[in-house]
């Protein structure tokens, strides 16, 4: 356990007192929360996939292996549109 003793100036003490009264907490809890928030801000942002739980939906795993490449995506979309148009033409 690390014990920290801070010597704050008058202005900082005033800010601390106002924050503590507004947040209705004690200095230990406030410092823990500030440290956690600062630590989280230092972490790299989560990807969309990580925010979704870390596993891509199965339909995103089907098809071409590299849909992140623009040319591959354009080709896949063009093929799907062509297939859709052919199916529409075959309808009575």
Image: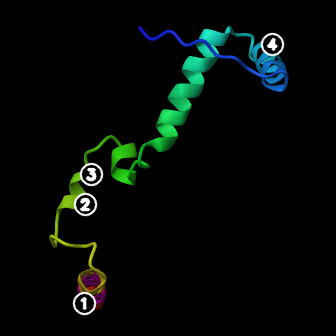
Q: CA distance from mark 3 to mark 2?
A: 6 Å
Name the image colouring. Answer: rainbow
In the figure, is residue 34 to the left or right of 70?
A: right
The stretch in magenta equals: 77-87
Image vertical order of residue 46 relative to residue 74, above or below: above
User: Relative to the observer, which residue lies in front, 74 or 38?
Assistant: 38
Which quadrant of the structure image shows residue 68?
Answer: bottom left
Q: Position of residue 59 (x, y in %)?
A: 24, 58
Q: Nearer the viewer, mark 1 or mark 2?
A: 2
Tell me: residue 6, above or below residue 58.
above
Residue occupying the point 30% across, 85% down: 74
Q: Can residue 92 be seen by looking at this rendering?
A: no
> Do residues under tags 4 and 1 come within 8 Å of each other at their CB atoms?
no
Q: Which of the two residues, 34 or 48, is positioned nearer the viewer here? A: 34
- Proximity of marks 1 and 2: CB atoms separated by less than 8 Å: no
Residue 60's disc number = 2
Question: The N terminus appears in which quarter of the rendering?
Answer: top left
Label 4 vs 1, first from the N-terminus: 4
Nearer-N-terminus badge (2/4): 4
**Magenta span dominant secondary structure:** helix
The quarter of the image holding the C terminus is bottom left
Tag 3 residue:
57
Residue 9 position, x and y percent, is 79, 22
Dot 4: what SS? helix
Dot 2 lies on which element?
helix
Query: Please, what secondary structure does the residue beneath circle 3 have?
Result: loop
Q: Which residue is mark 4?
A: 21
Residue 4 in the image: state x and y as whole percent.
55, 13
**Residue 51 appears anywhere in the view:** yes
Asked if the stretch drawn in magenta spans residue 15, the answer is no
1 or 2: tag closer to the N-terminus: 2
């Amino acid at each position: 356990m690390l014990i920290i003793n801070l010597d704050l100036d008058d202005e900082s003490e005033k800010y601390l007192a106002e924050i503590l009264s507004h947040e209705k907490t004690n200095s230990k809890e406030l410092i823990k929360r500030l440290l956690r928030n600062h630590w989280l801000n230092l972490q790299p942002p989560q990807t969309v996939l990580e925010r979704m739980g870390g596993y891509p939906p199965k339909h995103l795993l089907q098809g071409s292996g590299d849909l992140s490449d623009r040319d591959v995506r354009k080709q896949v979309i063009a093929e799907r549109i062509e297939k859709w148009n052919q199916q529409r033409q075959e309808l009575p």
